[in-house]
Amino acid sequence: MNKEDLITRILKSIFFKTATRKAGKYAGKGLAILELLREALTKAQDVASVENKGIGQILAEKITMIGRMLKAYASGEYKIIPWSSIVKIIAVLIYFISPIDVIPDFLPIIGLTDDLALITWLFTSLSDDLANFEAWEKGHLKSF
């Protein structure tokens, strides 16, 4: 199965559709977003320390980047991101923390394949939003 087939399968799955429905409820609640982010970072760090350090490290780095953007969004500092992008990010994080999905996480190493593919897809589909955030973040940090 190639990467595009896997992404298509994930996006059409009941697991991702459920995560997307839940994401809309999370998106307007700053504390819920931060808790979801904490859970996702904890899972990525657990993966890095227990299973596959390479995959876990990649997941942790990508989730950390998304986390900075979500924290800035939740605090009201950064609002230059479409609502649909916020919902997409939250849906991916909900999917990521769920142990039961297209490829269940309890399967050693292979169980993370769908999670990594989905997070990679997220970064590709939000490349403009992420570039805008990084530019904002660099300018914002210089002002302190």
Image (tube, grey):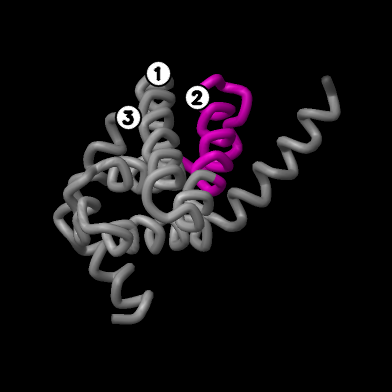
Q: In the image shown, does 56 or 129 lie closer to the viewer?
A: 56
User: Which residue shows up at 84% across the image and 24% down it?
Assistant: 143
Looking at the rendered structure, the secondary structure element under dot 1 is helix
Q: Residues within 10 Å of mark 1 (few under 14, many from 20)?
A: some
Residue furthest toward the bottom?
A: 1
Specify the segment rendered in magenta. Answer: 61-83
Residue on which disc 2 sits = 74
- Sequence-wise, the earlier of marks 1 and 3 is 3
- Sequence-wise, which precedes: disc 1 or disc 2? 1
Q: Position of residue 102 (x, y in %)?
A: 20, 60
Residue at coordinates 36% horizontally, 31% vertically from top-left? Answer: 39
Residue 100's label in the rendered image is none
**Alpha-carbon span between mark 1 and mark 3:** 9 Å
Category of crowding for the residue at label 3, using alpha-carbon neighbours closer than 10 angstroms: few (below 14), some (14–19), many (at least 20): many
What residue sits right under mark 3 in the picture?
Answer: 26
Does the residue at mark 1 contact the one at mark 2 (Cβ under 8 Å)?
Answer: yes
User: Label 3 near label 1: C-beta < 8 Å?
Assistant: no
